[in-house]
Amino acid sequence: MKIVIINGPNLNLLGKREPEIYGNETFEDYFFLLKKKYTTVELHYFQSNIEGEIISKLQEVGFSYDGIILNAAAYTHTSIGIADAVKAISSPVVEVHISNTFSRESFRHASYISPNAKGVIIGFGLKSYELALKSFL
Ligand code: DQA
């Protein structure tokens, strides 16, 4: 089982970015623990602050991986290009958000990705990624 977590802009700052919203843990630390817990899964991780790089990664993995866990961060609310890529590929995409976007500013309530996601997991902190991973198992 081959799964990739793709994180969008500013998620490289987890641990120091608005910890009251996103927590104190770095994604690298969390990812290390996740990999240790799910040894049967070939789990990969990619992060980019650049919209086109996220699209290229989706294209690269999107016809061979068993699942994609995508937190497009702010691009969730803005990017038709990422939404089109999610629609174009054949691997199932689970959309993830760390914070409960519906309890925040109204511009975070809309997602271009959700209509073409297999499912959406929102608001469980970093645990959202584990829940998404479990959905593929
Ligand atoms: C986020 C929510 C987005 O609105 C925000 O722009 C992010 C992170 C989340 O995981 O809670 O960068 O996707």
Image (cartoon, helix red, strand yellow):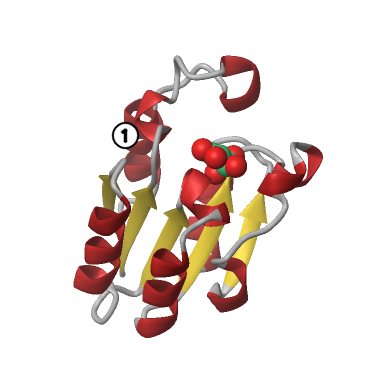
Taking 113 as reference, is 88 above or below it?
below
Q: Camera-side residue: 128 or 98?
A: 98
Residue found at the very far right of the displayed protein: 103
Q: Where is residue 126 in the image (x, y as percent from the top left)?
A: 54, 36
**Quadrant assignment, res 1:** bottom left
Q: Where is residue 77 in the image (x, y as percent from the top left)?
A: 57, 54
Q: Camera-side residue: 58 or 66?
A: 58
Residue at 32 percent across and 58 percent down: it is 4
Identify the residue under disc 1.
32
Residue at 45 percent across and 14 percent down: it is 16
On screen, residue 92 versus residue 48, left or right, reads right
Taking 101 as reference, is 117 above or below it?
below
Residue at 25 percent across and 73 percent down: it is 59
Give the mark count.
1
Q: Disc 1 on helix, strand or loop? A: helix
On screen, residue 25 versus residue 102, left or right, reads left
Which amino acid, by three-letter code, is at mark 1?
Phe
Taking 106 as reference, is 126 above or below it?
above
On screen, residue 114 versus residue 83, left or right, reads right
Regarding residue 53, the answer to whether it shows in the image is: yes
On screen, residue 56 versus residue 49, left or right, reads left
Residue at 74 percent across and 38 percent down: it is 105
Q: Position of residue 64 (x, y in %)?
A: 23, 79
Ligand 1's image quarter is top right
Q: Position of residue 98 (x, y in %)?
A: 59, 39
Q: Does the residue labelled 1 lie within 8 Å of ligand 1?
A: no
